[in-house]
Amino acid sequence: MSTAEILDGPGAAVPAEAGAFKELLRRRWSCRAYLPDQVPDDVIAEMFGMAQRTASWCNTQPWHIYLTKGEATRRLAESLTEHARGHQQVSDLAAPSRYRGVYRDRRREAGYALYASLDIEKTDLAAREAQMLKNFEFFGAPHVAVITTDRDQGVYGAIDCGGYVANLLNAATSLGLATVPQAAIAMHSDHVRSHLRIPEDRLIVCAVSFGYPDTGHPVNGFRTTRADLGETVVVISD
């Protein structure tokens, strides 16, 4: 039996909890335009409380979060945007060396969909740069959570933080919030560390901007695709 046949088979009935979780995953998307409304503190606490249940290597829970609200978000956005305009990237974790094959194709597909939603032509480099800089304004989100890991835990600490981020995104969705995970923020780790007074023993992994979505903005009208299971799962049966 082929991998496709195994993965596409009828299978057993899906429990109600699994169905609800599947729907939650389907509904989550990356928001790139927000309303200015602050998220209530009790909702924020519930979201981070759910994410705290993330499994980790030897239960080390290496994540430590620097969370902004109100004026702190605005000040960081202004400072980081100005810095990004005139400085080279400095990241704590190595960025991908290249995108090849299917990884390049998926990345391009997502980028084309983003620019198409805003009617930005491929040749309009000024408009593309302006949209890129919105990363450092957190797309207008009222809150940003900078995710850091313990320096001594190396790659496994960063992996654990990835699991934490996934749970944080899904927790936010369950609470009616919108999110966008942002590697771009970590590409200027030096400035973020200085601005937020993050200790040297913490590595900046990424950021998650969140708030209530501006559903009328065209940038929030597109969705990315997902590969078929046959492309990502290899079944070994004997």
Image: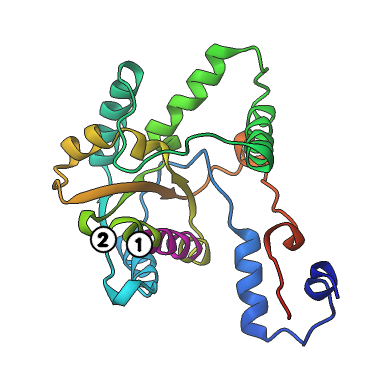
Crowding around mark 1 (Cα neighbors within 10 Å: few <14, some 14 to 19, many 20+) is some
In the depicted structure, whether residue 49 falls above or below residue 151: below
Q: Say whether residue 88 is left or right of residue 168.
A: left
Residue 153: give its label.
Answer: 2
Q: Say whether residue 234 is left or right of residue 155.
A: right
Q: At which x and y percent is residue 12?
A: 77, 87
Q: Residue at the spot x=73%, y=57% of the render?
A: 231
Q: Residue at the spot x=39%, y=72% of the render?
A: 54
Q: Main secondary structure of the magenta part?
A: helix
State the separation of the CA atoms marked 1 and 2.
Answer: 6 Å
Q: Say whether residue 172 is left or right of residue 67.
A: right
Residue 144 visible here? no
Q: At which x and y percent is residue 236?
A: 70, 74
Q: Say whether residue 182 is left or right of residue 59.
A: right
Q: Tell me, yes or no, whether the highlighted magenta stretch contains residue 165.
A: yes
Q: Residue at the spot x=27%, y=37% of the render?
A: 189
- Identify the image quadrant of the N terminus: bottom right
Identified by mark 1, the residue type is Tyr
Front residue of this view, candidates 68 and 199 = 199
Highlighted magenta segment, given as a residue range: 160-170
- Identify the image quadrant of the C terminus: bottom right
Front residue of this view, candidates 98 and 171 = 98
Q: Which residue is mark 1?
A: 156
Identified by mark 2, the residue type is Gln
Answer whether labels 1 and 2 touch (C-beta < 8 Å).
Answer: yes
In the depicted structure, whether residue 183 falls above or below residue 177: above
Q: Tell me, yes or no, whether the highlighted magenta stretch contains residue 143.
A: no
Crowding around mark 2 (Cα neighbors within 10 Å: few <14, some 14 to 19, many 20+) is some
